[in-house]
Image: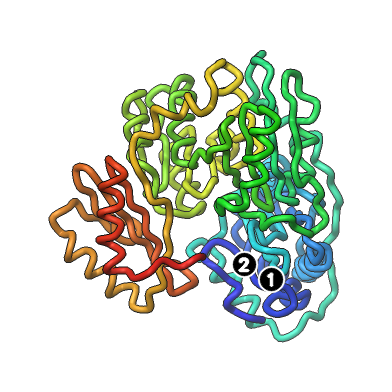
Amino acid sequence: MDPSIFKAYDIRGLYQEQLDEQAAWKIGHATAQFLRSMVHGYDRGLANSQSICVGQDMRTHSPSLTKALIEGMNTAGANVIDIGLIDTPQMYFAINHLGACGGVQVTASHNAAPYNGFKISGQQARPIGADTGLQDIKHIATALLHTLGTPDGAIEHCDLTTEYKKHVLKFLGGKHRPIKMVVDASNGMAGKMAPIIFGDLENVEMIGLNLKHDGTFKHDPNPLVEANLEELKKTVVKKKADFGLCFDGDADRLMMVDEKGQTITCDIMTALMTPYFLKDNPGSTIVYDLRSSHVVQEEVLKYGGTPRRERVGHAFMKKTLRDSHACFGGELSGHFYYRDNYYADSGMITLVHVLNIFGATDTPASELVAPLQRYSASGEVNFEVEEKEAVMAELTRQYSQGKVDDLDGVTVQFKDWWFNVRSSNTEPLLRLNVEAQTPEMLTEKFDELKALLGEPVDH
């Protein structure tokens, strides 16, 4: 087994080359040992407290990897509830709905077709990352010398589609104006779930793109890459839709475009959704990742909420949401988190809230977000840097006259501009975000930082 497949938040690698059925069996065995050991004594008597939910995405190798994963779990003595072909947020629902000790979704999320992997969650769908158990699972799995044993655990097959649809649609408000939307499923799991959940809604016309989900991709299932939004943008304009959304492969993330086919960045979406959530949750905390525009903090304060800036990554965002009892959180990567969804992210629930917001007004999407687009931002730009720590130390020294913090990498804030530089967990990359009050200042400061970081690379 290639130990490099164990990442900060999940397990992911090239099928056959890095990740095969033998590795899946060992990971299943190790995950079952770990998740069952984490069940508290008072929970052990519950019906499914020793059971593990397993689901899979549409990749061609997901069925065989799932079969091997389940066999490994059964051989460790665990009972498995197989919930079939699902989007990743349905896994978070299943764990809580069924009272399981955790779950594993077989998916490589936004990666290209040759990749696959596993997203592991514990009780109540708490994320299992490098700091919360994934290292333990890695140690157990890599120490296993064979894939032999008697599968003593049971397998139960469970279709939660009806219950999941009901859960998602419970967030839908009352009557709203007719909405025409375009949904690009990226040939991922939204291709199955979006028509089921939204296909028969009153006053909603859904135009589907790339709904076929057979493991082949018309474009990579990564909505953060602007080129992957081209078909969506053209279709929104051509069909005169109110807005468009593009999901990633496992449908836990999405990107939005307005009626003119212009991208609405996810921090602007967080800012847009802030008054909507604070109206029903006055004074509540709203969590956002530190790459987000300053407009997010300003909107949270404007509407009487408590802004909470957090490290990048779903494990950190979910923990902070839970700890602060925040009603909502947004990340620049397209993850949106909800207190009333077990503090977990969901692409489908995000679409429901978007329908609520845009269905309550006749104002076009572009006009709704225009007042929030008051700063100029670079977006996340990657630089290939071998001596990452040395370069970040030099940035700290050179910009020490600003307000410096190290919550995640190096952030330096000035009155009229700021930047953050973070290190990649897996590659020799530094990731830069810059925001300034004017386009001219953005260009000036970006070029200044580029002189220290080198030429951007396409990652």
Q: Which mark is residue 27?
A: 1
Classify mark 2: helix, strand or loop. strand
In the displayed structure image, the side of residue 320 where residue 421 appears, left or right:
left
Check disc 2 and give the amino acid type.
Ile
Q: From the viewer's perspective, is residue 174 above or below residue 417?
A: above
Name which residue lies at 67% across and 47% down: 251
In primary-sequence order, the first of circles 2 and 1 is 2
The residue at which mark 2 appears reads as 11
**Hey, which residue is sitting farthest front in the picture?**
238
The x and y percentages for residue 70 are 79, 64
Classify mark 1: helix, strand or loop. helix
Quarter of the figure with residue 394: bottom left
Residue placed most toward the observer, 165 or 343: 165
Q: Nearer the viewer, mark 2 or mark 1?
A: 2
Q: Are marks 2 and 1 in contact (CB under 8 Å)?
A: yes
Quarter of the figure with residue 306: top left
